Amino acid sequence: MYLERDEERILSGECGVDLQKAMEILVTLGKIYDARRLIPVKSAQIAGVSYKTIGDAGLEWVKSIDAEVAVPSILNPMGMDREEWEQMGISRDFYRKQMEILDAYRRMGIRLECTCTPYYLPGGAPSFGDHLAWSESSAVSFANSVLGARTNRESGISALAAALIGKTPCYGYHLDENRIPSIAIRVPFSLSGSDFGALGYVVGDVIGDRVAIFELEKSPAPSDDELKALGAALAATGAVALYHVKGRTPEADLFEIPEDAIILEEKELHRVYEHAGIPDLIALGCPHLSMKELEIAAELLRGKRVKRELWLCISRHIRDARKDLVRIIEASGAKVISDTCMVVSPACDRFDCIMTDSGKALKYIPSMCGAKAVFGKFRRCIEVALGEADEAT
Ligand code: F3S
């Protein structure tokens, strides 16, 4: 792998041990994947923030780093809402350790918004063709597929290394040839809302890490929120980091439709809705809610009271920007939760059955929270929380 003179200097340790280690990580990855060189990145998004997932070893590691990031960088959700942690049932010990992790990232110059939807933040959306080092799988999918930026599915460690150096090895989805779809997914029936999460849940399981192009034959062009849900689920049941939707996503029309194709049957999607049960928590916002989704939730909850615990997970930026909507939602007894989510917070471990409209959360809730997961449409989830639907079937 070719290194520039200044890159060699960092690798030799001339710029300090932390940058040397970061460069070693990038060069090792580059060698594994046959990268010819490093390329500059516009931004980094760093997972591995929740104390629930990284534990004491991760805490000690991030605390030991004495260096600043070279490019704009932002954190993924952590294990709690930094203001509402007590109401979430988070212990003081967990709070203290989580804040130590946050403080270590702050010292590195990383933005502390803690969201998996950094593209909703001012200045957070990459442009078409930008090279990035993002790590949260739904954010990676959205950046690659919906925005036409270029990032591999980084680990928290390799994203942090890229943030410190400002570069990443040039392989995988940074290269044109790896963005070509190898399988077509034909959907000959109409989809809307949470159906896209169900679609991703079914298809990701079948295609693994292949690049797919969807032909949505009976559906109107999906919204950004619907594509967000599709990509998150594809990346959860599979390892899909990039997909295209014919006529909708920015690179889709550059490619021929591959011969290898799957024609989906409607009953396959219906099976996702068969994940049923009586939830003691309804959790929406995986990935974190957009402004539009928050507006819809506020309209559904206006003037009503929830009968079951309802969480709406959202970035702190959107929460602060729409305090009017947050007031309506909180008046119903629902909780608006920032900095974290139903999967990475230990606060969910006390529930037995969690209902969600997210294909990604449906996949991870059983293993990460030890709870049964139930799937339903966004509106249906809120009706269940309000007691307007008796149970989630
Ligand atoms: Fe985001 Fe948590 Fe889902 S990080 S994509 S809300 S699992």
Image (cartoon, helix red, strand yellow):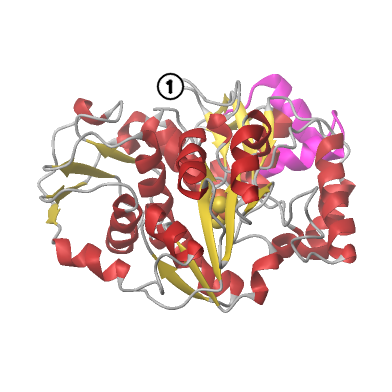
Residue 1 in sight from this viewpoint: no
Where does residue 354 sit, x and y in percent of width and height?
Answer: 52, 70
**Quarter of the picture holding the C terminus:** bottom left
Q: Within the image, what quadrant is residue 334 found in? A: bottom right
In this figure, which residue is indicated by the disc labeled 1?
A: 129
Q: Is residue 263 left or right of residue 335?
A: left
Q: Residue at x 64, y 28 (%)?
A: 321
Q: Within the image, what quadrant is residue 202 found in? A: bottom left
In the image, residue 9 lies in the stretch drawn in magenta: yes
Where does residue 3 sit, x and y in percent of width and height?
Answer: 62, 27
Q: Is residue 334 left or right of residue 113?
A: left
Where does residue 24 sit, x and y in percent of width and height?
Answer: 70, 42
Q: Nearer the viewer, residue 364 or 387?
A: 387
Q: Residue at x 39, y 46 (%)?
A: 231
- Mark 1 residue element: loop
In the image, residue 174 lies in the stretch drawn in magenta: no
Q: Nearer the viewer, residue 240 or 34?
A: 240
Which residue type carries mark 1? Gly
Within 10 angstroms of label 1, few (less than 14), some, or many (20 or more) residues?
some
Q: Is residue 181 above or below residue 277?
A: above
Mark 1 close to ligand 1, CB under 8 Å: no
* Secondary structure mostly taken by the magenta-highlighted segment of the chain: helix
Residue 102 in sight from this viewpoint: yes
Q: Nearer the viewer, residue 280 or 78?
A: 280
Q: Is residue 248 left or right of residue 263?
A: right
In the image, which residues are magenta?
Answer: 1-26
